[in-house]
Structure formats: C-alpha cells, structure tokens
Amino acid sequence: MRKHFLTAALVISALFVFAQGGDRFFPASQLTTVGAYYYPEHWDSSQWERDIKKMADMGFEFTHFAEFAWAQLEPEEGRYDFAWLDKAVALAAKYNLGVVMCTSTATPPVWLTRKHPEILMKNEDGTLYDHGARQHASFSSNYYRSYSLKMVEELARRYGQDDRIIGWQLDNEPRTFHDYGDDAHQRFRVWLEEKYKTVDALNKAWGTSFWSSVYSSFDQINIPRPSQWGTNYHQRLDHNRFADEETSSFLDEQARVIRKYASPAQWITSNYIPMYDVGYIGQSLELDFVSYTRYMVYGGDRGIGRKGYRVGEYTRIGMANDFFRPLKGYYGVMELQPGQVNWGSVNSQPLPGAVRLWLWHVFAGGSKFTCTYRFRAPIYGYEQYHYGIVGPDGVTPTPGGLEFSMFIREIGQLRNNYDPEARNPAAYEKRKTAILFDAGNVMAINMNPQTREWNTEGHFLKYYRALKSFGAPVDFVRDTVRFEQYPVLIVPALQQISLPMVDKLMAYVNGGGNLVMTVRSGHQDPRGHFWEAPFAAPIRELTGSDIEFYDLLPSHSPDSVVYNKRKYGWTSWGEILKPHSGTETWATFSGDFYAGKAAVTYHRLGKGTVTYVGVDSRSGDLEREILLKLFSKVGIPVENYPHGVIVEYRDGFGIALNYADKSFTMELPASARILSGTKEINPGGVLVWKE
Ligand code: GAL
C-alpha cells in the first residue's frame, strides 16, 4: 500500500516537474500560438461566422471574448444572458479557435452604477467618475468587489468546465487608481492597522513628529493628497502600496472564484501594461502567469534614426519580455499593436514589417502566445481610426493583419523544426545576467527624485542596453530568487535596503558572484528612513568604499568622469567615493572641486567581486564600458552588436532583430540553417536560424 502511495507520489511530482514552465497549458512543441480579440457584441450576429472563419483562415488559433460585455451578459440586475456568448463560443470551436474568456469588471453596466453610485471612483478634488467610459468603478468599493464577483461566478459556472475555453483574462489592463471614496479611506485605515498594529508604530514609521502630524488613532488618518504641497512621503508610500494591493487582491478574489469551477486545463491571467513603478504586477499569486500589452508606435518614442518612430524603441518589448517572464517562468503577450492606433500623440503608420518584427521579438523572449487587439477595426466609439487585423469593411486584411498571418505561417515552419533536445548556445547562456528589481523602491525614488535630471527607468535601461549589446540574456529578478544562478547580478539604485538583503548580497559575493551596485543604493531602510549612520553605511563593507557626499548638476552644466582616458558626461547623480584600502578606482570625477576623486570602484570580496558605479552617465556609454571590463575580467565572452540589433535564442532557434536604421550582417556558424530571412538584415527585418 505504502509502496503504491510512494510510486503515485513520484509520478505526480515527476509530472509536475515536467509541467513546469507553462507546458501544462502550452505544449512545448507548439512553441507559441497566436490569437485575436473579437467583440461579438459590436457586430451584427449575421456576420459572426464570416469573421470567425476569416480569423481561422488567416491562421489564428485562438480568440478572446466578453472583455467589456457586462451590459450584455447581465442586462438587468440578476438576469444573465449567455445565449449570445454560447453562440460565439460554438462558432469559434467550429473553426478550431480556442477561446480566452474575460471578466468584464472594467465596464460595469449603467443600472449598477445608477443604483450604487458609491462604486464610482472619487478624485482627490471630490469629483466623481461617471458611466460612459471604462474603468470608472473603484476596486476599493466594497459593494463593487462583492457584486462583480457574482457576475464572475456566473461566468465561471457556465464556462469553467468547457474545454473550448483555454483560459481566463481577469479585468482589462488592471492598474492602480487613487480613489478618495469613503470605502477607500476606511479600507486604507484597516490596512494600516493590520500593518502597524499600534498608532505609535505608525507615527514612528511615518516620522509624524515632523511638522506636528502625530496621530492618536487610526480613524484620524485619511488618504494623502499628493497635490497638497509637502504631503508626508512615508504616508504616500504606504498609500501607494495599499492601492497596489487593492488591485492585486481584487484579481486574486476573481481568480479564486473562477478556480472553484474551472478545469485544471484552463489558465488564469490578466493583461498588464508594463509599468515598472507599480507593485501589483506579479503580486496576484493566484494567477498562473502574467501577460502584458504593448503598443510601439504612438508618438512617444523616437526609436533609432529619423524614421525610427515607425518601429519604436526596442527596449519596450525587450524589457517587458525580460521582466514578465521571470515572474512565473513563462508569460504571454495579450495585446500587440496590429497597426496604427488612435490614442497616441501622433498616430503614425508603423514601418512595413514592423508588426512582424515585434511578433518575432515577443517570441524571442520566450512568450507562449501573442494575441492582438483587435480582429476588426472599430467603426464607432472612442477607438475609431484604430487598426485591426481586418479593416473597417470587416473583410480586408490590413498590412499588419497580413504580417500576423506571415508570422503564423513562419511559426508553423518552426514547429516542423522543433527539437526537444535542442539547446541554446553555451556562450549565450553563460552571459545570462540578472538585474534586481523592486517596484516599491522604484516608486519611492520616483516620489522623491531629488533632481529632475534623474530617471529611474532610464537608469535601469542604461545597464539593460549594454547587456543587450553584449548579446546577453537578461532576467529582471525579485529579491526572492537564488542569486547564485547568475554569474553577474546588477543592483541598480536600490535606495531602500533591508539588513537581511545586505546579508544575502554578501553571501552571493562571498560565494563567487559578481555584483554591480549603482548610485543611490542603500541610502534608506525599508521604511524610507535614512540610517542614523554615515551615508549608506550598511553597504559600505560590501562595496569597499565610503560615500563622502553626493552631487547633482543642472542640465545646462554637465561635468564628466574619466574612465580609461575618455570623458563621459553626467548630470543626474554623482557619489564622490572614498575607496577603502584594497579597492581599485576605475573612474574619477573631473571638472569640479572634487576632480580626481573616485566615481567607480571595484574590489574582490570572498570568492567574488563588487563593482560600485557611483555615477549615472548621460548616454549610458560609461556603464557599458564598465560592464565590458567586468565581463572580460571574470572571463565571460561577449558579443558587440550595434545599438538596436537584438539577438536572442529560444528552443535552440536563433533570432536576430534589427530596430536600427542601417542594415546589419549577422555572422552565423557554418552549421547554421537559415529558416527565415537573410544574413543581411534590413531595418525592421528579422533573421531566424537553427544551429
Ligand atoms: C489597450 C487596451 C485595449 C484597447 C487598446 C487600444 O491599452 O487594453 O482595450 O483600448 O489599448 O489600443
């Protein structure tokens, strides 16, 4: 009996291990799968079959329903109508399309809003949001939370055991809104009481002796108003954390309700906008994985060269891939721009080929699927002028639609070449680098930047870009991972640090890790207080140097640091370092009263090394040079790709992407077999091969 039990347990755990990394939902041999959003409620039902057949004919393998359809699903309180959705699901199945089912909590119906106006979000100035747009209900409204779960439950009861439904999307692009409604105030107070237990502890953490802000009970505390000058920084930090948790806990509640009914084959996710100063992404632990949405051409980024805006900035996809994947080990992309959008500041046409380039980039990051918003271009409503896979006539594929089809065909070919034994090149894997990421820390810095020259995401990207030019795979990691799996760990601007974290970094370095720490790190404890000690005292043994002082320069008067006889300009943040004995100085400040003092230091510690970069250069070239020196010192060979050329490997396939404005010729080993493209890759082009 016991033997059988053990065998069964072994089989189950082996299956579990086998099913890691998303294979449970997405068979590895399928590589990736492509879908498109469809809104049956927007079109005459006589057109549904034509549209769904067209989607299947264009190669799509799944679709996405009911995202904003609460008004159609529950036309009046407690009366549910699934007949129309049943019909759409049946049509999808007829044409072999899987269905992602969505909870429409981003769009409550008007009868609910009118009967319960307290569900509406209240602005800081007291004005209320209203019906007629979307995302106007507050996740902090007790009634909204409980009532919407009823609708979610009905949906799950209906479709949870339906094998035509492949997975669930919760809400749409959930994010944190700052609601000033009564429930929000009340829930914030409860959250604070749970966190601090006593109001004394809160007073200490918030430093309320400053400016006479002392509280004597939790009831006196309100949600802070950032527009009021000088609002308590610690209170705002806590309020942001609270608001993030309102978002993540609401998604968790939805997921728990769905799980009561859903078959284990159905996955649950949500589609986040990649934002790096919010805590809720990755915080809903009930989700199987996280997916993201991405739009590249919208008037916001210049890209590379005069026409680079038609392709967009490559790090927008690259960083999102490398940020979302490590959260659960795999990820998907729920929305990828199909063509021109309507909401940007300048809604240009993407470069012909750009949509396919982005699809390949998402694939190169390891994505299990890519879906697009949306199949048919809308002909009315807020998103007029937005492209779809087919145009406003409902039948003619757009250029982006054709690029989706082309990519789907190419993936079909790749599937034929899939080899479960194939491995990525050892040199590529050896370069794998981690960048430590802590959303609370980013939020805290952004709230208190000290200088308008500082840009936290921009600081991260300087290191990220350097690593991409080396052809290094990158994981953005949380502090819970085992650092030891990465030969190099970059800890950029970790302003708030705990003492256990210092110990963890110390252990990593002592064990042979190569740590790169940068400006602003270690200044505060996790409450956001400075240490009652010399600046950044807890990390000084780790970094091997003290900070004498820091300086910030105005944009019209940059200075430079000298590294290897070359000068690199800076303005945003400089820490004037005093190396301990045995610590090397790699770069020095020049051009001001502290000329000649150390800006970048390096030392060996235990079996490892620590490089401290005490300056944030303007262009990022200095950061690249420092990493180059470090990689060569520790014996990790790197590539030297030009800016905008990205090379990644997955499942043994090599993928080179050209976001630059010049062609690039890729050198391939003699054994390489080209599957798509040519060695000379034009701007916007892609090369795929197998080694
Ligand atoms: C996304 C959103 C979609 C749609 C799209 C338009 O941010 O999730 O619902 O509005 O933008 O580009």
Image (cartoon, rainbow, N blue to C red):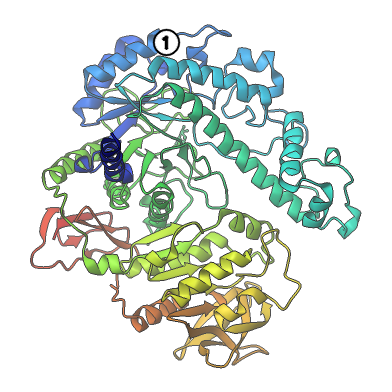
The answer to whether residue 382 is seen in the rendering is: no
Query: Who's the residue at 49% across and 38% down the image?
Result: 343
Q: Is 605 on the left or on the right of 246, as rendered?
A: left
Q: Quadrant of the N terminus?
A: top left
> Residue 630, relative to residue 94: is it above or below?
below
The quarter holding residue 160 reads: top left
**Considering the numbered disc 1 on the image, is that residue within a helix, a strand or a loop?**
loop
> Residue 494, relative to residue 575: is it above or below?
above
Q: Is 292 on the left or on the right of 46, as rendered?
A: right
> Residue 28, relative to residue 303: is it above or below?
above
Query: Who's the residue at 28% across and 52% down the image?
Result: 364
* Residue under pointer 1: 82
The type of residue carrying mark 1 is: Phe
Image x and y of residue 193, in percent? 76, 42
The quarter holding residue 667 reads: bottom left
- Using the image as rendered, state which of residue 377 and residue 178 is in the foreground: 178
Q: Is 276 on the left or on the right of 394, as rendered?
A: right
- Using the image as rendered, state which of residue 158 and residue 313 is in the foreground: 158
Image x and y of residue 492, in percent? 53, 67
Q: Residue furthest front?
A: 1
Q: Does any atom of ligand 1 lie closer than 8 Å to the CB of label 1?
A: no
The answer to whether residue 255 is seen in the rendering is: yes
Query: Who's the residue at 39% across and 50% down the image?
Result: 325
Query: Who's the residue at 66% across and 70% down the image?
Result: 523
> Residue 463, relative to residue 2: is it above or below?
below
Q: How many marks?
A: 1
Query: Local crowd at mark 1 within 10 Å, few (<14), some, or many (≥20)?
Result: some
- Using the image as rendered, state which of residue 496 and residue 13 is in the foreground: 13
Image x and y of residue 451, in percent? 67, 67
Q: Quadrant of the C terminus?
A: bottom left
Image x and y of residue 647, in percent? 27, 61
